[in-house]
Image (cartoon, rainbow, N blue to C red):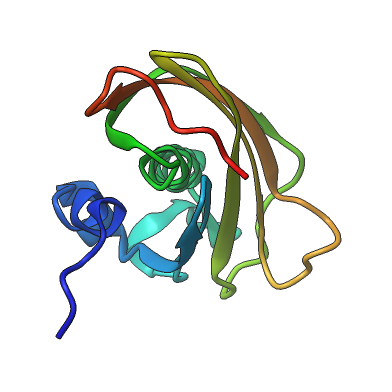
Amino acid sequence: MTDPSPAQRFIDAIPHAKALGLELIQIADGKAVMAMPYSEALIGDPATGVIAGGAVSALMDTCCGAAVMSYPGARGTATLDLRIDYMRAAKPGQRITARAECFHATRTVAFVRATAHDEDEGLPVATASGAFTMETSSGRPEAKS
């Protein structure tokens, strides 16, 4: 068995990721894809069965953090600022998938964009943009090729 990546260890160490059932689907070079299964425990409005916005926020924040952790040279991260724009409610019964990309990094800060969608990939549930601390072993991120 191979040693898990720093990003996978990061996800595994977060109690809320386990509680929400977050699954790391893909991760590499400053990009991450995560999914959150539909669960009645996460319903925010019992009348409609819609997942609570806080669960969507946690998914997007965690996915963004994973993207930073997979950025070349990154060793640690924390959220500095995260803006989430909700476009629509996710369809009840469907899992929500988030995709995040670290598109720029300075010596200590990474900038990330993300989208979340249910099974209708063409119509986002939410979008996010944020800034995250980025701890590196050398004090500088490695250049992405």
Report x, y in % for residue 1: 14, 86
Residue, far right:
122
Judged left or right of residue 116, residue 59 is: left
Report x, y in % for residue 17: 27, 54
Q: Which quadrant: the C terminus?
A: top right
- Can residue 34 be seen by looking at this rendering? no
How many discs appear?
0
Report x, y in % for residue 111: 56, 23
Report x, y in % for residue 125: 70, 49
- Residue 71 figure quarter: top left
Q: Nearer the viewer, residue 57 or 33?
A: 33
* Above or below, comparing residue 108 to residue 17 in the picture: above
Residue, far bottom:
1
Q: Which residue shows up at 24% across the image and 52% down it?
A: 6
- Residue 92 figure quarter: bottom right
Q: Nearer the viewer, residue 142 or 42?
A: 142
Q: Which residue shows up at 18% across the image and 78% down it?
A: 2
- Can residue 36 be seen by looking at this rendering? yes
Q: Which residue shows up at 60% across the image and 59% down it?
A: 48
Judged left or right of residue 57, residue 100 is: right
